[in-house]
Image (cartoon, grey):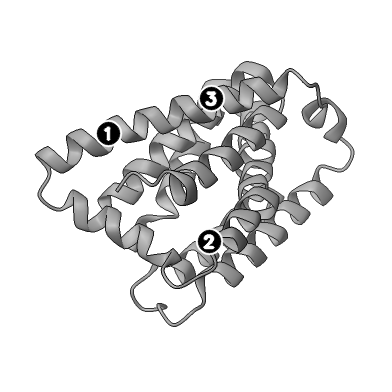
Amino acid sequence: MTAPAVMLLIAAAGFFCLFSPWTQQIPFWPVMTAMGLFLASGSLLADRKELKPVYEFKFCYLPVGLASALMLYAVFWAGHYFSTHILPFAESQVDSIYAIKEGKNKWLIAALLVCIIGPGEEIFWRGFLQRRLSKKYGWLIGLIAATAFYTLVHIWSFNLMLLAASAICGMFWGLLFAATGKLWPCIISHAVWDVVIFILLPIR
């Protein structure tokens, strides 16, 4: 079995534990943090000979990442406004997503999102999985397949709004990675978007 297949199975199992209704007793934030660390470490180890071109950092990636995060937040704000006026279940499903932070220290969550969870997801989903799939099958197939996998691992939540959000985010950051060939714009965008939409300016 190939490294991407093994890592993808591990990611799928981890997301099942995080989101399924049968595993609600599992503490979300410690497991999400551990999974981010594991997937990122495994990806970096597997690709240790090919890291330099993908992880090259330039200061221009900061405004790109910030601007793209704000753009994505605007998309979600508009999407939430219209979906809650059209779909009767949208509001309750969005509320259930935000419920995972209730009673927790929001600044600790913000730190985990910025330092571990957001970067870890980008390192695995875009820097490892999408890059490898694109290298083998072409950038378009790599983008579509990685986005599909990123969306489907959330299926055990049985939350249509979360699945839609995953698909939008996966395609957005996948396109950003395909356009730049670098991971830092995606890492910055993901981390900033996480904190803005989840901590600073929630859409509900």
Figure check: 168 above or below 115:
above
Judging by the rendered image, the residue that carries numbered circle 3 is: 68
Q: Which mark is residue 79?
A: 1
Judging by the rendered image, the residue that carries numbered circle 2 is: 106
**For the point 51% across and 60% down, which residue is it?**
12
Residue 204 point in image, percent of width and height: 29, 48
**For the point 46% across and 31% down, which residue is it?**
171
Q: Quadrant of residue 189?
A: top right
Q: Which mark is residue 9?
A: none
Q: Going by the image, does 108 lie left or right of 57?
A: left
Residue 174 point in image, percent of width and height: 54, 30
Task: State the CA–CA distance, disc 1 to disc 3.
Answer: 16 Å
- Label pair 2/1, CB-CB below 8 angstroms: no
Task: State the CA–CA distance, disc 2 to disc 3.
Answer: 23 Å
Foreground of the two, 1 or 160: 160
Mark 1 vs 3, N-terminal side: 3
Q: Nearer the viewer, mark 2 or mark 1?
A: 2
Residue 97 point in image, percent of width and height: 36, 58
Q: Nearer the viewer, mark 2 or mark 3?
A: 2
Badge 2: residue crowd in 10 Å (few <14, some 14–19, many ≥20)? some
Foreground of the two, 190 or 125: 190
Secondary structure under tag 1 reads helix
Q: Is the N terminus in the top left, top right, bottom left or bottom right quadrant?
A: bottom right
Residue 72 appears in the figure: yes
**For the point 71% across and 61% down, which residue is it?**
38
Secondary structure under tag 3 reads helix
Q: Going by the image, does 55 lie left or right of 13?
A: right
**For the point 45% across and 24% down, which residue is it?**
71
